[in-house]
Amino acid sequence: MIRAIIDGTRAATARIALPQRVFASSSTNGRSWLTTLRGTRFWRHQVKKRIAALMRLATDWALFILVVLTGGFSSAYMMMDHGSTLTTLTSGPWSMWTATARPDADPYTRAHHARIGALPLPADIAETWIARADGAGDALHSSCDYEISVTAPAASWWSLAVFDADGRLIQNAAARYAFTSDTAAISPDGRAIALLSRSAGGGNWLPTSGAGNLSVVFTLIDMSVALGTGAETVDLATRVPQITAKSCR
Amino acid sequence: MKTVLAQLRRIDVRLVIAALFAITVLHIATVFTAPSLAMSSAWDRLAPALKANTMIVFPPVTPEAQPLPYLAPDARIAMCLFDTRQAPVALTASLPAPGWSLTLYDKNGLAIYTAAGRPDRPTAVSLLLVPDDDRFMGLTPEAQGLRSPRQNQLRVQALRGLAVLRAPDAGFAYRARTDAELNAAACQIQQPKP
């Protein structure tokens, strides 16, 4: 295909005639100096045309290579970083790689975890959900306060941890980084409500300090799945926590 | 409209197909080479800090001591860099409660083996990690007519990787018990019996 394009361009430029008369001596063919001067101008014009054709060819190739590099790398980056319906499950702002750490993981999942350098629990025993936005779709940011409501299955262990955008823990004087089903204060209705805020709060408060963009990780080990006593179908909307923005500064 | 159609007609279809083909090739090559080209995979970060075939209990995860990204202090961790190139490695651990897990990862971060704690009873895990090639490891006790000391030991084929024992943080009151369970986990070379 590319060879055909090159050959086509070469044929098009070859049709441009070279000024043969310029090379002939004026003394032998009897042409005047004016004719020679005009021939020189014509030769220059032809050279310019050839250079312009070559420039067009070079520009076309540069554009072709730019499009290929941009398309190839950006599509790979998008699929490795954000996943797709083939590799991830999504529920509201939450997404989960369905083949995390499994030996039969697809290349996108392998590349995703290799790039971020994490060692997550395998999808066989745990669900690892990550959210970078609230329920309304706005990016999580430390300048806002958020309420996260966890309603996990009864026979389960879960944890809720907050990180900055790169997966680093957020430094804070209270040394609070995560809550688990063992350490969180549970409401009478069975929910655990965590507050993400840079200002001190009561209950399950997770400080966000001045971290900028945030990511929240919800890890769920559902024993009912392991024991075979869980429901056949799982409602993802109720399985993951609800993130609600309360106020922003 | 006519101008747009005229412009569209000028597009070389062969060039478009060639571009799509090249984009696809580059996309596939990027995705497949990304794990090996990753500058800081979990193995690269942890292997230099670990001693081979020794279980090491990590201190609680803090912002100053966070070995891996997205590793939360919701669990205490013990790790062993196992290497079966010289000899088999015996690995024992106990998973007393839900949330506990033992996972063997290969160098690419894929789980070779995983076990999780159950709510009804503690789970004792005893593994013998053996090389994944056709290496002769000597006669088994059974072949020698002896009673095997490893009756409840599961054989797992793995060459090099990380064994990660996770213990959920159940709160300050339980930390001593959690530490005791983590310290009791063992990862060592299986010495051949005379």
Image (spheres, coloured by chain):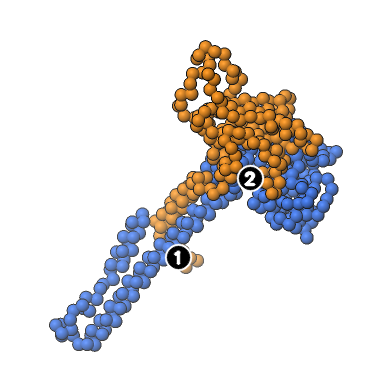
Chain colours: A blue, B orange
Where is residue A141 shown, x and y percent of the image?
Answer: 72, 55
Where is residue B183 shown, x and y percent of the image?
Answer: 69, 32
- Identified by mark 2, the residue type is Leu
**Pointer 2 local density, CA inside 10 Å: few below 14, some 14–19, many at least 20:** many
- Residue A129: name its quadrant: top right
Q: Is residue A124 visible?
A: no
Task: Report helix, strand or loop for mark 1.
Answer: helix
Q: Is residue A77 above or below residue B158?
A: below
Seen at 49% across and 49% down, the residue is B30
Seen at 18% across and 84% down, the residue is A26
- Identified by mark 1, the residue type is Gln
Q: Is residue B9 above or below residue B136?
A: below
Q: Is residue A21 left or right of residue A113?
A: left
Seen at 78% across and 60% down, the residue is A249
* Badge number at residue B7: 1
Q: Is residue A46 above or below residue B36?
A: below
Where is residue A51 shown, x and y percent of the image?
Answer: 34, 71
Disc 2: which residue: B68
Spatial CA span between label 1 and label 2: 52 Å
Seen at 56% across and 51% down, the residue is A78
Task: Report helix, strand or loop for mark 2.
Answer: loop
Q: Is residue A33 left or right of residue B53?
A: left
Q: In the image shown, does A13 or B194 lie closer to the viewer?
A: B194
User: Callout 1: residue from which chain?
Assistant: B
Q: Is residue A35 visible?
A: yes
**Pointer 1 local density, CA inside 10 Å: few below 14, some 14–19, many at least 20:** few
User: Callout 2: residue from which chain?
Assistant: B
- Residue A3: name its quadrant: bottom left
Mark 1 vs mark 2: give the one in front. 2
